[in-house]
Amino acid sequence: MPNDQSPTARALRALEILRTRPTTTADELADRLGVTERAARRYVGILREAGIPVESARGPHGGYRLGRGTRLPPVHFTQAEALGLVMAALSGRPAVADADDLVGAALGKVVKALPESVGRQAALLREYASAAPDPYAAHPDPAVTSSLVEAVAHRRRVLLTYRSESGNTWEEEADPWSLVVRHGRWYLLCHSHRVDAVRTYRVDRIGAVHSTAQGFVPPVGFDPVAVLEEHLGSGWRFATRVVFDAPPAEVAPWIRPPMGRLEPLKDGCVLVGSTRNPDMYAQEWLARVPFAFRVEGGPELRAAAAALAARFTAAVPDHRPGSRPSTG
């Protein structure tokens, strides 16, 4: 599609809309195409002239729909869609530029299948754009991920094998509620029958998944991302308690959910939670908050904050008049 504004391109876009929406009114079609209702009908006419059976349904719930047994042409991309696909792949997986990478090989096939006028810019972007690897990203096994998605979709309890960060391995029976991708990592949000509690597991640490015939009902109206964020900030080995002199409304934008729960405290607020890594908590999270604070607990976080403060103090030599520079 050399031009997104051409009648042919608009007609193909109309076909894509009809393919994904079983019944689409002329008004909805016009709105999705960004044209008048009369123009939308004209593009439907172009599709019919090309031999694609587009049926009309009258009444308050009527509209256009594709006839049964319609054989559609290959998927068409606009240039903007093709570029967006490559950009999204590079953002989520820097190695996608490598043809030996699983996703990179798939993306290469998609780009090669595009018409020259559409795929040229996408190919150039993939070849010359670079992405720095994310040291915190982790890519799970596609087969494991597929099994979990299937179980989530059909609400089937699973038996899985899990390996913790310390290397301990155990078998788990769980109700898989949702998969959440967060900062380059995939998480399984589930109800663990082993401990009878909500758990979040890194999908890249799941070794095997077996679906069972046992069904389950997920919580009504729960927000997977919010629940994941809440659980990432609780239940860890080292307790944390940080007091801020600023009010909660000012501090809140700087607090990530995994840091803990922010509560009012006199004229300021207090952040209560837990962490598995006090050094990271102090260096990567607390150090970025632009407000005065006091670390009241636990002892591990206090030690990490004191070590960080000592490092910064040593990094700024005393240049007061009369002072002698350190000789090391």
Image: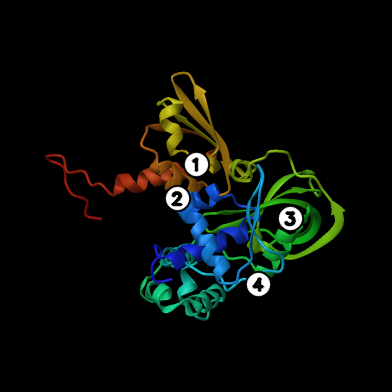
Dots 4 and 1: beta carbons under 8 Å? no
The residue nearer to you, when weighing 152 against 57, is 57
* In the displayed structure image, the side of residue 18 where residue 89 appears, left or right: left
Q: Amino acid at mark 4?
A: Arg
- 4 vs 3, front mark: 4
| Residue 45 in view here | yes
Q: Amino acid at mark 3?
A: Ala
For marks 4 and 3, the one nearer the N-term is: 4
Q: Amino acid at mark 1?
A: Arg
Q: CA distance from mark 2 to mark 4?
A: 28 Å
For marks 2 and 4, the one nearer the N-term is: 2
Q: CA distance from mark 3 to mark 2?
A: 38 Å
For marks 3 and 2, the one nearer the N-term is: 2
Which numbered disc covers residue 153? 3
Q: CA distance from mark 3 to mark 1?
A: 29 Å
Q: Is residue 249 above or below residue 222?
A: above
Question: x%, y% of residue 57?
Answer: 66, 52
The residue nearer to you, when weighing 152 against 184, is 152
For marks 2 and 1, the one nearer the N-term is: 2
Query: Which residue in the structure is indicated by mark 1?
Result: 256
Query: Which residue in the structure is indicated by mark 2?
Result: 36
Residue drawn at x 51%, y 69% as measured from the top left = 76
Dots 3 and 1: beta carbons under 8 Å? no
Q: Amino acid at mark 2?
A: Thr
